Amino acid sequence: MSKSSKEKIQEEVKLEMTPMIDVTFLLLIFFMCLIKFKMLEGKLAAYLPKDVGVNNTPIEEPLEKIDLRITVEGESNGKDPLGRTVGKRKLQNVKYWIGGSGFTELEAFKKRLQYIRSQQPELKATLAPSKEVLTDYVVKLMDACLAIDLTDITFKGSSAIR
Amino acid sequence: MARKSRSTASDVDMNMTPMIDVVFNLIIFFMIVTDMTQQELEAIVLPLAYAAVEDKPDPNERRIIVNVDKNGSIKIKRKEYFIEPDKLPQLAQYLRIAADQSPKDEMGLPEKPILIRADQETEFWHVQEIMEVCGQQGIQIWKVNLACSQPAE
C-alpha cells in the first residue's frame, strides 16, 4: 500500500523552480552590491610643512628643493588634452611651473622635471597650486611627479601662496 | 484518495529552502551594513591618477577621512561641516580630538595620515583650507593622502 502511494508521489514530482530563482536573485543582489563597493580607490601621499603653528619644529632644509606651481590661464573649451569632449565637467586651461618656467602641456612639464631629477637624485618637490585651480590638476601634477619617482612632495604653507 | 493524502503527510519533512534563503539574506544584509559603517566615503568623482597606491585600509584602524565635494562642502562620517562661518572651527575641533587619539611619532606629531577625498572639480583652495587647519597648533597632522581613483586596466 505504502509502496503504491510512493510511486504515485514520484510521478507527481516536478522541478521546483522557486528556490533556484531565489538563489539566483540572491547572487545577483550580492554581486551588485559587491561591484558598487569594489570601486578602485587609491591615494597619493604628500606632506604639509612641519613648521606651521606655534609649536615650531625645526626642519632641515633640503638641499635640492624645487618649487612646482600651477596657475589657471582661463576656462577650457570642455576638451581634455586628447581632444575628447568631456561632458559637463568643469575644465581649466592651466600652466604648470617649474621654478620660473611654465608649461602648458603636462608631458613637456614631466620631461623637464625628469631631466632635473636625473641631475639631482635627491630632489624634493614643494607644491604651490594657485587658489582657484581644480583638484584634478593638482593630482595630475602629483601623478606626474610620482611617475618619475619623485616621491617627496610637500605642500607649501598657504600663507606663501597668496 | 483519503488514504493517499494521509500517506503523503506521513513522509513530509521540513522544507529547509526558505530558512536557508532567509539566512543568506541576513548574511548579505549584515555584510553590506558593516561595509557601510567602515567606509565613511561619500560618493564623489575622484581625480584620476596612474601612480596612485592602492588604498587598503586596515579595518581596525581608525583613520581620519575628510570628504570635500565640488562646492567645497566638507563631510566627515556623513556629517556636514559646511555651515559658514563656523565651518573651519568645527573642523578644527574635530581634527584636534582625532589628532589627540592618533598615535604619535618620535617628534610628538600624529603618525597617521589624513585622507582628503576631494572631488576632481573642487577648487584647490577648499583643500588648502583643510590643510591649513591640519597645520594648526594642537592638530599638526602633516601627512596628507589625497584620494584618487585608479584608471581601469
Image (cartoon, grey):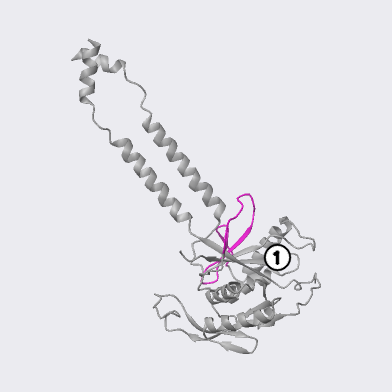
- Residue A150 seen anywhere in this rendered image of the structure: yes
User: Can you tell which quarter of the image residue A117 is in?
Assistant: bottom right
Question: Which residue carries the number 1 mark?
Answer: B141
Q: Magenta stretch: residue A84 in it? A: no
Q: Relative to the observer, which residue lies in front, B44 or A47?
A: A47
Apparent side of residue B112 relative to residue B23 in the rendered image (left or right): right
- Which residue appears farthest toward the left when viewing the image? B1
Q: Main secondary structure of the magenta part?
A: loop
Q: x, y (%) of residue A111?
A: 57, 82
Apparent side of residue B24 relative to residue B3 in the rendered image (left or right): right
Q: Relative to the observer, which residue lies in front, B78 or B112?
A: B112
Q: x, y (%) of residue B129?
A: 63, 73
Q: Looking at the picture, which amino acid does disc 1 mark? A: Ile
Label 1 sits on a secondary structure element that is loop
For label 1, the crowd category at 10 Å Cα-Cα, with few meaning under 14, some 14 to 19 and many 20 or more, is: many
The residue depicted at 76 percent of the width and 63 percent of the height is B109
User: Can you tell which quarter of the image residue B128 is in?
Assistant: bottom right
The residue depicted at 32 percent of the width and 38 percent of the height is A20
Which segment did they paint magenta? Answer: B53-82
Apparent side of residue A128 relative to residue A39 in the rendered image (left or right): right
The residue depicted at 68 percent of the width and 68 percent of the height is B134
Q: Relative to the observer, which residue lies in front, A107 or A129?
A: A107
- Quarter of the picture containing the C terminus of chain A is bottom right
Q: x, y (%) of residue B9?
A: 29, 17
- Residue B86 seen anywhere in this rendered image of the structure: no
The residue depicted at 60 percent of the width and 85 percent of the height is A97
- Quarter of the picture containing the N terminus of chain A is top left
- Which residue appears farthest toward the bottom when viewing the image? A100
User: Can you tell which quarter of the image residue B7 is in?
Assistant: top left
Q: Is residue A7 above or below residue B18?
A: above
